[in-house]
Amino acid sequence: MIRAVAVVVLVLLLLTSHAGGADSIRVGYLGPLTGIFAAAGKDMLDGLKMAFEQMNYEVAGRKIELIEEDDEGNPATAQAKYRKLVAQDHIHVLTGVLLSNIGYALVPNIERDRLPSLYLTTPDELTKRRPAKYLLRSNFAASQPMHALGDYAAKTLKYRRVAAIAMDNNFGHEGIGGFQRVFEDAGGRVVQRTWVPLNAMDFAPYLTQVPRDVDAVVQVFVAGQAVRFAKQYGEALGGRVPLIGTGVFTDQSALSGMGDEVLGHIGTMIWAPTLDNAANRTFMKIAEAKLKRMPSYFHAVMYSSGRWIVEAARSLQGNVEDRDRFLAALRRASETTEDPRGPIKLDEYGNPTENVYIVRVDKVAGRLQNTVIHTYPMVSQFWTYKPDEFLKTPPYDRAYPPVKP
């Protein structure tokens, strides 16, 4: 009799093994929720929540449990929070990660733990010369959209001489490097590159170095630096030398703090609020209802990440414990999930091949917006270069490509 009862209890335990909080699908979010990068980190988290709220935090009969951790923009803090997410919370997938130094630092742990991870951070080398098996990127490689801008500046805008000014970090170096390589392959020339420290908010010493005889200036700045640079550039060179550059510069997260000084700015981005497709219309409706404001690109990319997690879990009937199958399902989800950005396909290095949009800042109904004026369809992180040949050249950095005399 005792043996029969034990068997019944065991069967009931097996039948209910996917029920309750202990067997939820656990998603770890790691990003800056305090400190100077908190605005982007909070937008990222809200974007992820939108995807899960759309599904009522449930997929394939299992609850989705979102565990939020603040890395404070600090690599040491990020390492401690990562250990907590893995060892204590037993997450099935890691999402978020904004800063490149944190992204690089976590890779050995992710590979050791065989933890499927969806990064937002953009360093080229994470999906070029230093790819990791369990790491996928849901955003873009830093040079990827800037390759397209180099092509557009040379072939459509007909610029021949351009000066570059950018933040002195990986995002700045790789963005300008990607622009310069394609721009110069198309017959243009970057005549000067100026690097600005990340803590600089007075751009006058750097703007005085910009040659006045160039066709345009190409920039890479984001967040608070972008807002301040836009104002000071407008005062120093506005109306005389056109400004082009990364679309993150005028993303909604920064554009709301800018004025008419950025009208006509031409940038390059993987998403814009004005994109007219069914998935983006759905996303915009959800986002504006939740946020009561225009969403940023950080919202859109993390919404994609959440949608990929949901679709991957559904395709596996909720069996996310098989990490290799879950990782493969996340890859497939990038192709099969309708995305606000348009079509997406992860390449063999874990980076999205996706549309890149040339956007212009216009004023519509009294409000600044990014208007899509050209689409480069399904752009690879290697542009039109063959990957094996591209990887033989030096990585984009502070000195490469060099400025030719």
Image (cartoon, rainbow, N blue to C red):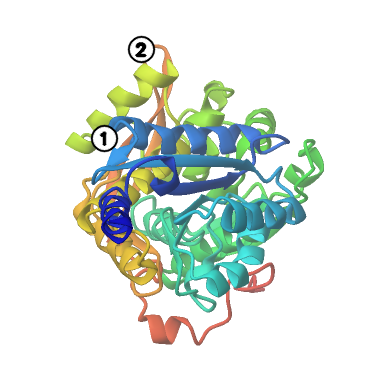
Foreground disc of the pair 2, 1 = 1
Mark 2 touches mark 1? (CB < 8 Å): no
Count of numbered circles on the image: 2
Viewer can see residue 181 = yes
Neighbour class for label 2 at 10 Å: few (<14), some, many (≥20)?
A: few
Above or below residue 196? Residue 231 is above
In the depicted view, which residue is nearer to us: 114 or 355? Answer: 114
SS under mark 1: helix
How far across and how far down the image is residue 329, in percent?
A: 28, 62
Q: Compute the Cα span from label 2 to label 1.
A: 21 Å
Tell me the quadrant of the picture where the C terminus can be found.
bottom right
In the depicted view, which residue is nearer to us: 61 or 269? Answer: 61
Q: Is residue 277 left or right of residue 325?
A: left
How far across and how far down the image is residue 97, in percent?
A: 57, 51
Above or below residue 254? Residue 174 is below
| Residue beneath disc 1 | 280
Neighbour class for label 1 at 10 Å: few (<14), some, many (≥20)?
A: many
| Residue beneath disc 2 | 365
Give the quarter of the image for residue 365. Answer: top left
How far across and how far down the image is residue 138, in percent?
A: 41, 54
Above or below residue 119? Residue 325 is below
Q: Is residue 178 left or right of residue 138?
A: right
